[in-house]
Image: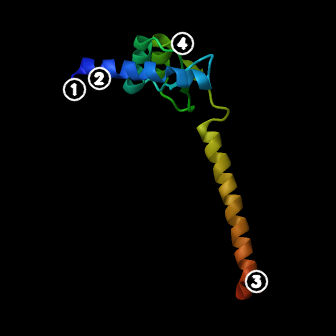
């Protein structure tokens, strides 16, 4: 299949599915998850070429390269940048704390179940 045929097929598919996207979200249509990478850029431009209703969103992680964020802001100003409620660092700390608490409870329960260990001071 030649490149133009692939582009035409993709545009036709987006147009065919637009009503389904509008049924889910009449205001914005398609929810286009955007990363700033080449695949996201291609899909963004295909949606523009198809003339379908869509809203592009980029979910930031708190460790995104600043160059990528600048690139998206400069070249795709209509992409909504969604900032995380918590940084990945804080999320890792929280998860690690939860994991350690869970492990200490598990160890305490196992000691109580083991007759030999339960008698140790």
Q: Is residue 26 above or below residue 118?
A: above
The N terminus lies in which quarter of the figure?
top left
Instruction: Give the residue number, with chain letter if any, for mark 4.
Output: 78
Instruction: Give the residue number, with chain letter if any, for mark 2.
Output: 6
Secondary structure beneath label 3: helix
Report, in whole angstroms, how far the alpha carbon at label 3 lies from the one at label 1: 71 Å
Left or right for 25, reference 121: left
Labels 4 & 3 near each other (Cβ < 8 A):
no
Which label sits in the foreground, 2 or 4?
A: 2
Secondary structure beneath label 4: loop
Dot 2: few (<14), some (14–19), or many (≥20) neighbours within 10 Å?
Answer: few
Q: Measuring 78% from the left and 82% from the top, which residue is drawn there?
A: 121
Q: Nearer the viewer, residue 29 or 41?
A: 29
The mark that comes first in sequence, 4 or 3, is: 4
Q: Measuring 51% from the left and 14% from the top, which residue is drawn there?
A: 73
Q: Position of residue 65 (x, y in %)?
A: 47, 27
Q: Is residue 102 above or below residue 1?
A: below
Dot 4: few (<14), some (14–19), or many (≥20) neighbours within 10 Å?
Answer: few
Q: Position of residue 78 (x, y in %)?
A: 54, 12
Q: Is residue 110 visible?
A: yes
Q: Position of residue 32 (x, y in %)?
A: 51, 24
Left or right for 53, reference 10: right
Which label sits in the foreground, 4 or 1?
A: 1
The mark that comes first in sequence, 4 or 1, is: 1
Instruction: Give the residue number, with chain letter if any, for mark 3.
Output: 118
């Amino acid at each position: 299949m030649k490149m133009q045929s692939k582009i035409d097929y993709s545009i036709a598919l987006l147009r065919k599915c637009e009503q389904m996207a509008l049924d889910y979200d009449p205001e914005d249509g398609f929810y286009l998850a955007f990363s700033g990478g080449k695949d996201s850029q291609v899909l963004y431009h295909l949606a523009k070429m198809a003339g379908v209703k869509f809203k592009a969103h980029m979910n930031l992680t708190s460790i995104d390269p600043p160059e990528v964020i600048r690139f998206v802001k400069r070249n795709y100003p209509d992409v909504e940048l969604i900032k995380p409620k918590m940084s990945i660092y804080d999320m890792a700390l929280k998860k690690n704390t939860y994991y350690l608490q869970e492990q200490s409870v598990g160890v305490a329960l196992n000691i109580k179940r083991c007759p030999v260990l339960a008698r140790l001071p």
